[in-house]
Image (spheres, rainbow, N blue to C red):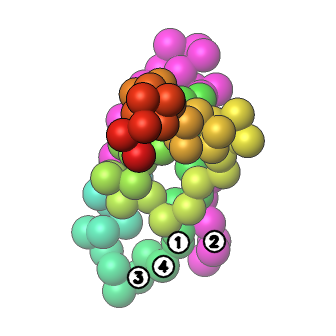
């Protein structure tokens, strides 16, 4: 009956456990029972832009993303070079 389940993947990674694997397992299980399990997957303790992309591809419903990671997602060195060189 829970509305959300919130695995902290960064903290799992910190103790040498695969946080992303847990997300994949949870999403798969919940998708196997769509009529009875309406719980949303809220991924927490994201540590990189790559993890944001990975959990989205796995089907996570929500993610808490630190401001530092959001800034990294919108800033890319090749984009900066393009602006500097007048390409954009």
**Residue 31 in sight in this render:** yes
- Residue 8: x %, y % from top left: 62, 38
CB of mark 1 within 8 Å of CB of mark 4? yes
Q: Is residue 68 magenta?
A: no
**On screen, residue 53 above or below 69:** below
Q: Which residue is mark 3?
A: 36
Q: What whole-number distance in Å separates the C-alpha atoms at marks 2 and 1?
A: 6 Å
Q: Which residue is mark 4?
A: 38
**On screen, residue 48 above or below 31:** above
At 55% from the left and 36% from the top, the residue drawn is 75
Q: Earlier in the sequence, mark 2 or mark 1?
A: 2
Q: What whole-number distance in Å separates the C-alpha atoms at marks 4 and 2?
A: 8 Å
Q: Secondary structure at mark 4?
A: loop
At 64% from the left and 26% from the top, the residue drawn is 11
**Residue 79 in sight in this render:** no
CB of mark 1 within 8 Å of CB of mark 3? no
Q: Earlier in the sequence, mark 4 or mark 2?
A: 2
- Residue 86: x %, y % from top left: 43, 37
CB of mark 2 within 8 Å of CB of mark 1? yes
Q: What whole-number distance in Å separates the C-alpha atoms at marks 3 and 4?
A: 6 Å
Q: Residues within 10 Å of mark 4 (few under 14, many from 20)?
A: some
């Amino acid at each position: 009956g829970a509305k959300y389940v919130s695995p902290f993947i960064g903290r799992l990674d910190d103790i040498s456990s695969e946080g992303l694997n847990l997300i994949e397992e949870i999403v798969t299980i919940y998708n196997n029972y769509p009529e009875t399990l309406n719980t949303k997957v809220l991924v927490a303790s994201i540590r990189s832009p790559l993890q944001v992309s990975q959990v989205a591809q796995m089907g996570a419903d929500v993610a808490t993303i630190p401001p530092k990671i959001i800034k990294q997602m919108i800033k890319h060195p090749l984009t900066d070079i393009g602006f500097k060189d007048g390409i954009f």
